[in-house]
Image (cartoon, rainbow, N blue to C red):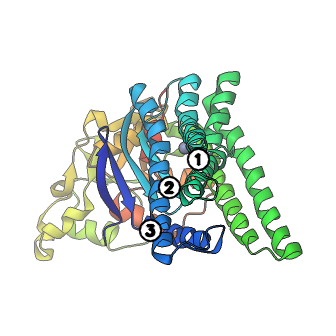
Amino acid sequence: MQADWRIFSILGIPLYIDSSWLLILVFVTIINANNLSAGQLSDINSVTSWIAGFIMAIVLFISVVFHELGHSLVARNQGIKVNSISLFLFGGVANIEGESKTPEEALQVAIAGPIVSILFFVAFSLVKLLFLSASLWHFLIQDLAKINLFLAVFNLIPSLPLDGGQILKAIIWKITGDRNLGILWAAKAGKIIGCLGIFLGIILVIFSGEIGGIWISCIGYFIVQNDCECQELVEVEKYLLNSIAKDIMNREFEIINAKLNLKDFAELYVFETANDLPCLAAVDGCDRDSIVKENLQLIAPDLRSDCSLSHLILPIAEKHLVEEKTSLIEIIKKLETIDNRCIVVISGVGTVAGTIDRVDIVRAIASQHNIFISEAEIDKVKQENTYPDRLQISAIAEGITY
Ligand SMILES: [Zn+2]
């Protein structure tokens, strides 16, 4: 089943709905229908209560869309591309490409969503007054006002990536002039609030037997987890900004004479799994050419003793070489643009000083930030030549402007 359904576009922004959102639709319809028939309006017939419950679920959907539209339109006004708005189990998200350039602009984007929700709350609260207090319409519109107030208040919790966290980030960014410090402070605030939520939930369950406490603890846990990820992201960004090739390059590599025959090469460097070092080929005194081991299989085993290593050699263009002082961000971006799996680092005197591939980068970041990366994940990096899903290093490097 497809994860997202594209429903329609609003003002040129595609709207997607995740299948998990259907659960919310059913859940909200049932809750509202039950509330209506069991509450002040017990004389209401069951068909009407179900229809009213369903309408309220749809209006919740519209309220969330307008909240996200608030963020999206302000971002678009600042020249930032808005890819889509998606609704899923826990609410909505505007997929905005890039970030505001100043703290003032970041604040405007963050605050736009809650402002829309508060305006809806005020509007529904006023419209409600037009109907008799015991009528179905009064009851429905009052609930719609409450839904929008809840959307505004929940999103204002100062935790990333919620709007409250984004607002706090923008304020600290404005005061200190440091965007990353803004994210770190917002992440710290979020972690404290998340821990309080977990604690409060447990207290409620233990001392008052309130089962809803479990839900509060779960939300607290998600908040803590999200803020830890945000903090980790900033620290990784900082590491990428401050590191150079020399810091992470692999100093162990083999330089093999290009005249070696492929049979010997295969036995010494391909089938001998203990020898997994990066290999470079020396051709006519130059030791910078890369060897494409994968191409060995294109040459039949009985022909290999008559062929030299030069069949597997791919000269490395000057643009694929880096200096020891080249920034790590530049190297990550370069790796995305070349076919070679590794980049060669050249010393100040023009000799090969080391090599850098994606595994070296992942291992360096993981050890620096105590992130556990399993050997299975490392194998995947080697085979697929991509980064682990939870450490999208190229996307982080792309996002850094300096
Ligand atoms: Zn929001």
Q: How packed is label 2: few (under 14 Cα within 10 Å), some, or many (20 or more)?
A: many
The amino acid on which the numbered mark 2 sits, given as a three-letter code, is Leu
Q: Quadrant of residue 291?
A: bottom left
In this view, 176 is above or below 137: above
The amino acid on which the numbered mark 3 sits, given as a three-letter code, is Ile
Q: Is mark 1 within 8 Å of ligand 1?
A: no
Q: Position of residue 206 (x, y in %)?
A: 86, 75
Callout 2: SS: helix
Mark 2 or 3, closer to the camera: 3
Identify which residue is drawn at 31% across, 68% down.
2
In this view, 72 is above or below 63: above
Which residue position holds label 1?
Answer: 128
The reply to whether residue 392 is visible in this rendering is: yes
Quadrant assignment for the N terminus: bottom left
The amino acid on which the numbered mark 1 sits, given as a three-letter code, is Lys
Determine contact: label 2, label 1, CB under 8 Å: no
Identify which residue is drawn at 52% across, 36% down.
244
Q: Position of residue 384 (x, y in %)?
A: 34, 62
CA–CA distance in space, label 3 to label 1: 19 Å
The reply to whether residue 161 is visible in this rendering is: no
Q: Is mark 2 within 8 Å of ligand 1?
A: no
Judge left or right: residue 308 versus residue 135.
Answer: left
In this view, 196 is above or below 319: below
Looking at the image, tell me whether mark 3 or mark 1 is earlier in sequence order: 3
Q: Which mark is residue 368?
A: none
Q: Which mark is residue 60?
A: 2
Mark 2 or 1, closer to the camera: 1
How many badges with numbers are in the image? 3
Which residue position holds label 3?
Answer: 51
Foreground pick, 277 / 166: 166
